[in-house]
Image: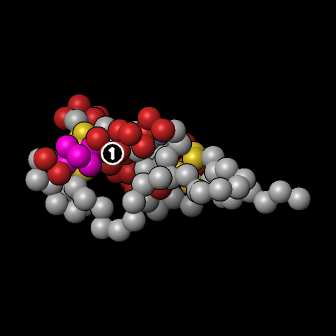
Amino acid sequence: MEKRRSKTACPWCGGVVHQPAVGRPRTYCRDSHRQRAYEARRLGWRSGLGPGEAIVSARSLADLGDRLTVLEAALEDVEEDIRNVDDSQAYHQAFDHLYAAAKPLSDHRLRVRATGPERSGGDR
Ligand SMILES: [Zn+2]
């Protein structure tokens, strides 16, 4: 019986990396994402970024901020709605409200333009 390696997330896009049954494990979901990550590291090096530093697109950052604002407002709504309430329907509605606010955030990926050097490991 063939043994499959577990799936991992692509560090560039967050997508699933399908591991080959045999051979070297893959880090990126596709070669173009490995290439973009390489280019981002190269730009980061030329920009003088340090470990853990990155440059992201302003639009992507603003979009993330908008989605976080929606989630923050939903949390405030839910805190108020379920305070002193012991009603399962109120909790279900609170969950639905929070889920609707959190789902767009879970789908968001920051568009990274440049990254600083990695602390360990390389890419494959
Ligand atoms: Zn990817």
The extreme front residue here reads 23
Which residue appears at 47% of the width and 52% of the height? 124
Q: What stretch of residues is rendered in magenta?
A: 40-44
Q: Residue furthest top?
A: 59
Q: Main secondary structure of the magenta part?
A: helix
User: At which x and y percent is residue 59?
Assistant: 23, 31
Q: How many marks?
A: 1
User: Can the viewer see residue 98?
Assistant: no
- Classify mark 1: helix, strand or loop: helix
Is residue 10 or residue 23 the one in the foreground? 23
**Residue shown at 25% from the left, 59% from the top:** 117
Asked if residue 102 is positioned above or below residue 50 in the image, the reply reads: above
The residue under the point 79% across, 60% down is 3
Instruction: Say whether residue 7 is visible.
Output: yes
- Queried whether the magenta region covers residue 69, the answer comes back as no
Q: Position of residue 74 (x, y in %)?
A: 39, 45
- Three-letter amino acid code of the residue under disc 1: Tyr
Residue 87 rendering spot, x and y as whole percentages: 59, 56
**Residue that badge 1 annotates:** 38
Q: Residue furthest right?
A: 1
